[in-house]
Amino acid sequence: MARLAGRRALFAVPVVLVVTFGVFAIAAASPFDPVKAYAGTAALGADQETLDRLRDNLGVDQSFVVRWWHWLTDALTGDLGHSGVMRQPVAQVIGERLVWSALLCAVAFAVAVAVGTLLGVLAARRPGSMLDRAVTSLAYCLEAAPVFWIALLAVWLFALQWDVLPAGGLTDTASERVTAGQVASHIVLPAGVLAVSQLPWFTLYVRQGVGDALAEDPVRGARARGIGEGTVLLGHALRSGLLPVLTLIGSRVPELITGALLVESVFSWPGIAAATVEAATAVDFPLLAALTTLATAAVLVGNLLADLLYGLFDPRVKLSEM
């Protein structure tokens, strides 16, 4: 396990270098002016000399290669730079927002795995039945629905029509402090929408995996020996059928992050979405590079976790050979 993690860590180094270099290159080619974004409305009445001086202070005139190298060497020492658009150190911006994004993704992922496993097992028990067709049709419909459309529909239904859940934010209006109860009520809609966007994949994978496991000879033999259906399903078919789902953990991380950005924007969730959008539009090199590196690291860790889980639960796979 340690050797596999070490190899993946070495592989991650060139990946992060390429990704961060690409971020600086794309940001440099962006039509947005970071000086005007930094100055805001004050840039409208500023003369060219003031803008040039501000441009020099921000280091915008330097090539993106020089800026990337300076950012990289500083990041290796723990200094992620200063965000011009947020007027804060990059580490502080990420520290204040990452915990809420992580909470949202963790809750949504747990709900998607639990509900997807349940629906997949129910559908796989009787292939071709009305329940199987209903679950499969629902999964394909949700798979085709954009996450922002689901989010807007949820706001319209649960917040505007039924008025049972808050439409957005982290706490109630005019609240001076964050409480667990307020966070719990406000996270229901965004986490539910994000879970629904991931639900089809887990449902379909579990349905296919458990359905194939139920048709295997060991499961048929267990049924022939008179073992109860619940034991056969939970003790034999489910364990074997969940193995393909483990590979989804890593592959779904990129879409989970993308979906979280859209969901946070719709529900005004105080995560990294707003920071990402503002960093992109303002060409905030340090913040944009740090957020992209963070997303890249999350994808790499997700892939590593999927491989580790597969090696632990599948006796045919040896971690020492991976």
Image (cartoon, rainbow, N blue to C red):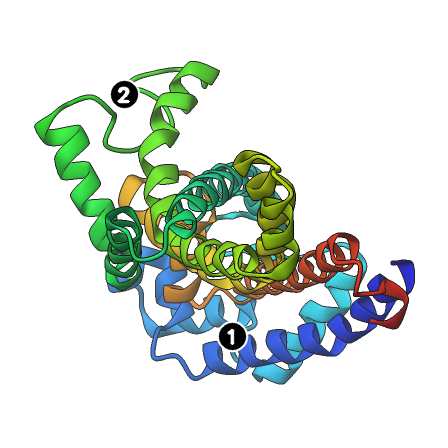
* Quadrant the C terminus occupies: bottom right
* Disc number for residue 173: 2
Hey, which quadrant is residue 193 in on the image? top left
How far apart marks 1 and 2 lie (CA) works out to 39 Å
- Category of crowding for the residue at label 2, using alpha-carbon neighbours closer than 10 angstroms: few (below 14), some (14–19), many (at least 20): few
Q: Position of residue 79 (x, y in %)?
A: 72, 55
Is 129 positioned to the left or the right of 306 in the image?
left
Residue 318, placed above or below residue 263: below
Q: Position of residue 298 (x, y in %)?
A: 62, 58
Residue 72 seen anywhere in this rendered image of the structure:
yes
Is 267 positioned to the left or the right of 322 in the image?
left
For image coordinates 60% across by 38% down, the residue present is 226
Q: Position of residue 142 (x, y in %)?
A: 27, 55
Residue 190, placed above or below residue 309: above
- Front residue (pair 104, 212): 212
Residue 50 seen anywhere in this rendered image of the structure:
no
Q: In the image, which is nearer the foreground, mark 1 or mark 2?
A: 2
Q: Which residue is mark 1?
A: 60
- Front residue (pair 38, 264): 264
The disc labelled 1 sits on which kind of residue? Val
For image coordinates 28% across by 46% down, the residue present is 131
* Quadrant the N terminus occupies: bottom right
The disc labelled 2 sits on which kind of residue? Thr
Is 65 positioned to the left or the right of 51 in the image?
right
* Label located before the other in sequence (1 or 2): 1
- Category of crowding for the residue at label 1, using alpha-carbon neighbours closer than 10 angstroms: few (below 14), some (14–19), many (at least 20): some
For image coordinates 64% across by 46% down, the residue present is 222
Which residue is farthest left?
161
